[in-house]
Amino acid sequence: MFARARHIAVLLAAFAVNFGLDRLTKSLAVAYLRGTDGFSLLRGSVVVRFAENSGAFLSLGAGWPVWLKYAVLLAGPALICIYGLYHCAFKEPDTAQVAFLATVIAGGLGNLVDRAFNDFAVVDFLNFGIGSLRTGVLNVADLSITFGAVAYLMRDRAARRRDGLAGGDR
């Protein structure tokens, strides 16, 4: 019982930090970057400039009909996030994995809030790169999703490797 309570506490903390930072930074981007040219840091390695994305990753689906956007960009991901929260709270045995999944879910829900209340437009404002080698424009939610997913997969792979070697598999 104590382990489950710890998982729920970790879930809530990781979710609150990631979701809160996403909402805060998007609010700041709307307030201070919209209508400006933005700015760059670290000799252009980080460009901070307001943008809105009415699709998903790299604007995928931006031109879709509204009913398809509701299904694919809003309802489907919302159901996945709700199941993910349930899984973290009641099924996931590893506390670290709960934190990583909560990070992914918080990022996903952060972008879903934008889509739901901003006519499917997600606020983006970060671009990373060197010279012409650059990322797409993204936000803190996207960073949370990426970090959480990579950390989850790395831990899962390490656990499988450890369990495989411990069980005699090579």
Image (cartoon, helix red, strand yellow):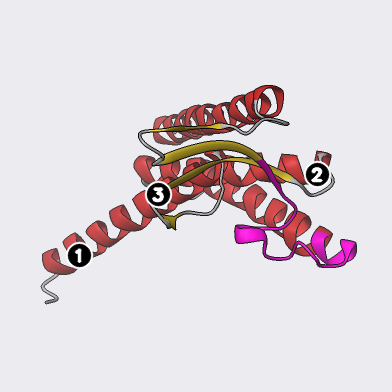
Q: In the image, what residue occupies the spot 36% across and 36% down?
A: 43
Would you say the residues marked 2 and 1 are in contact, meaning their CB atoms lie under 8 Å apart?
no
Query: Which residue position is annotated with label 3?
Result: 129
126 lies above or below 169:
above
119 lies above or below 48:
below
Label whose residue precedes the other's in the sequence (2 or 1): 2
Tell me the SS state at disc 2.
Answer: helix
- Identify the image quadrant of the N terminus: top left
State the separation of the CA atoms marked 2 and 1. 41 Å
Q: In the image, what residue occupies the spot 42% across and 44% down?
A: 100
Where does the image place residue 93, in percent across and percent down from the top left? 39, 48
Q: Which mark is residue 78?
A: none
Q: Amino acid at mark 1?
A: Arg
Q: Residues within 10 Å of mark 3 (few under 14, many from 20)?
A: few
3 lies above or below 105:
above
* Foreground of the two, 128 or 84: 128
Label whose residue precedes the other's in the sequence (1 or 3): 3
In magenta stretch: residue 88? no
Query: Which residue position is annotated with label 2?
Result: 116
